[in-house]
Amino acid sequence: MLERMTNADAPEPRPRRRAPAGAAVLREDVTEAIRAAVFEELAAVGYARMSIEGIARRAGVGKTAVYRRWRSKLHVVLDVVSALAVQGLPAPDTGSLEGDLRLLYEVTSRALRHPVASQILPDLQAEAARNPEIAEAVQKALREGQDGVAKGIVTAAQERGEIAPALDHGLALDLISGPLYWRSVVIRSPKLPKGYLDGLARATTQALRAL
């Protein structure tokens, strides 16, 4: 008969393994995959029909991976839209106001007419009319992205003496950003007329000099 094992003979319980340092850090590649999936899902189904399940499926991750980063689809979209402001646009430096504007319009036009962006922006604008948080995020992204670059163009032109040093910056930014946004996002013109960006840069330069 086997003798009963005493407490002294019982094997000591194994100490619990401590998670390695940094194990709780969220993987950046997964985060970026989810952000990319949000853009694609927004373009495919729109904000109203978008779901965490759809985002996770498109990103190739589990729903838990999404919920570990954001509490809801609203917070996912707010984060992604706000990230646009951080990325911003490249600051043109051609040496002239008209050249800087022409380059800005070229880059912006390509971005706004991208198939994904052309689907997402109108949908977010419509959703912004119903949701103050989305409205604030969209305004922040547009203001800190496009307007931040436009302000740099205006400041550089002032330093070169091309435009008045005391012009109204708010009005200047509206003149720079408004026309292309109106044509590409609001009325969603399928194609810009030939020479449109050249003419827009030239007309905007003349308008800024007249302020």
Image: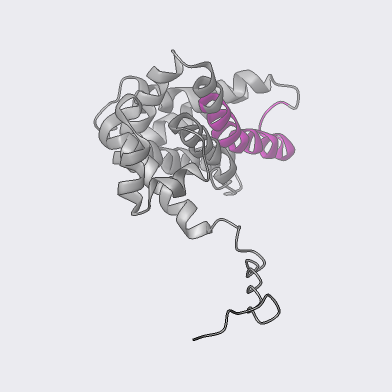
* Residue 41 in the figure: left or right of residue 81: left
Q: How many marks?
A: 0
Residue 189 drawn above or below residue 27: above
Give the dominant element type of the magenta stretch: helix, strand or loop. helix
Q: Nearer the viewer, residue 41 or 113?
A: 41
Residue 174 drawn above or below residue 9: above
Q: Name the residue rendered at 41%, 28% in the picture.
A: 180
Reply yes or no: does residue 58 show up in magenta.
Answer: no
Say how the picture is coloured: one colour
**Farthest residue toward the bottom?**
1
Which quadrant does the C terminus fall into?
top right
Q: Quadrant of residue 184?
A: top left
Q: Which residues are magenta?
A: 138-164
> Can the viewer see residue 206?
no
Reply yes or no: does residue 155 show up in magenta.
Answer: yes
- Find residue 202 and report its horizontal and vertical position in percent: 47, 31
- Find residue 179 and report its horizontal and vertical position in percent: 43, 23
* Residue 80 in the figure: left or right of residue 162: left
Q: Name the residue rendered at 59%, 38% in the picture.
A: 149
Q: Quadrant of residue 144?
A: top right
Q: Nearer the viewer, residue 65 or 143?
A: 65
- Find residue 172 and report its horizontal and vertical position in percent: 60, 23
**Farthest residue toward the top?**
130
> Can the viewer see residue 86?
yes
- Find residue 65 and report its horizontal and vertical position in percent: 45, 49
Q: Nearer the viewer, residue 3 or 54?
A: 3
**Farthest residue toward the front?**
1
